[in-house]
Image (cartoon, grey):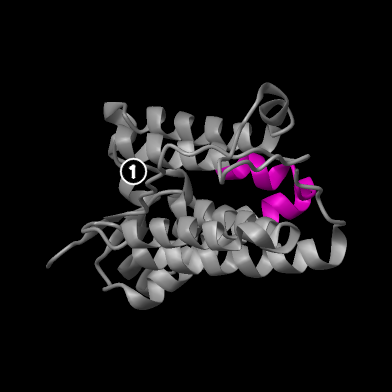
Amino acid sequence: MVIRIIKSFYLVPINKINLKKAKIRLGMIILDADDLKNAKLTLTLILINVICYIIFLSPVAKDYLLLFVQINHEIIYDYQIWRLFTSMFLHSDPLHLFSNMFGLVLFGALVENNFSKIEFLVIYFVSGLLGSFFSLLILPPYSISLGASGAIFGLLGSAFIIIALENPSLLILALMYVMFFLTASFAPGINAWAHIFGLLGGISLGYIFRKYTHPKVVYY
């Protein structure tokens, strides 16, 4: 039996962007204290992910980790559907956790400050579940995957929509961001399918929410 462990791994370059009253200058995203203060759901999700990682470091809890990661065989044949959800809060090592949480604070704060709280949660969890679901369909039965980056790629997709709709002059730059992250997804041991379908989910939901329920953000 061959078991493949695949991380939902998120690599983020050292670029910065702003948020709600969004100043996007030279393609850089700038976070300030007010941005983070208003991103309570993003910070809560980061806290939950960190707590889950710490809990499963303990010798006792570590034995139960495999009950919550995504193992396709267990979902298909034993109907352990919860794994599609719980695997979104688990990470394999400190670098995996740090990379995903950095991506979460960067794009999560941007999206949370430009959508309603409910819309933000829908984007995050639906994108994450889409990534898990298509990983279930595409990856081999004994693959093991875990990580939040399907959901984080959904936030990236929605951030792309904000820029594309509100400031088309930065569309090429936004596409470069997306292509960079997608290219990094095809490194060995990374669950590219979670990233791809999470991204598509975020783009679709971001477009629907942004186009029909929100006025334009003024970029300057």
Q: Toward the viewer: 15 or 189?
A: 15
Residue 105 belongs to magenta span: no
Task: Tell me which segment is drawn in magenta.
Answer: 107-122
Horizontal arrangement in the rendering, residue 35 relative to residue 139 (left or right): right
Horizontal arrangement in the rendering, residue 44 relative to residue 78 (left or right): right
Q: Quadrant of residue 145?
A: bottom left
- Residue at left 55%, top 58%? 174
- Residue at left 31%, top 29%? 57
Q: Toward the viewer: 69 or 108?
A: 108
Q: Amino acid at mark 1?
A: Leu
Q: Position of residue 9 (x, y in %)?
A: 35, 50
Residue that sits furthest to the left in the current view? 1
Residue designated by label 1: 65
In the image, residue 96 sits, relative to residue 135, either above or below, namely: above
Q: Quadrant of residue 161?
A: bottom right
Q: Position of residue 199 (x, y in %)?
A: 52, 63
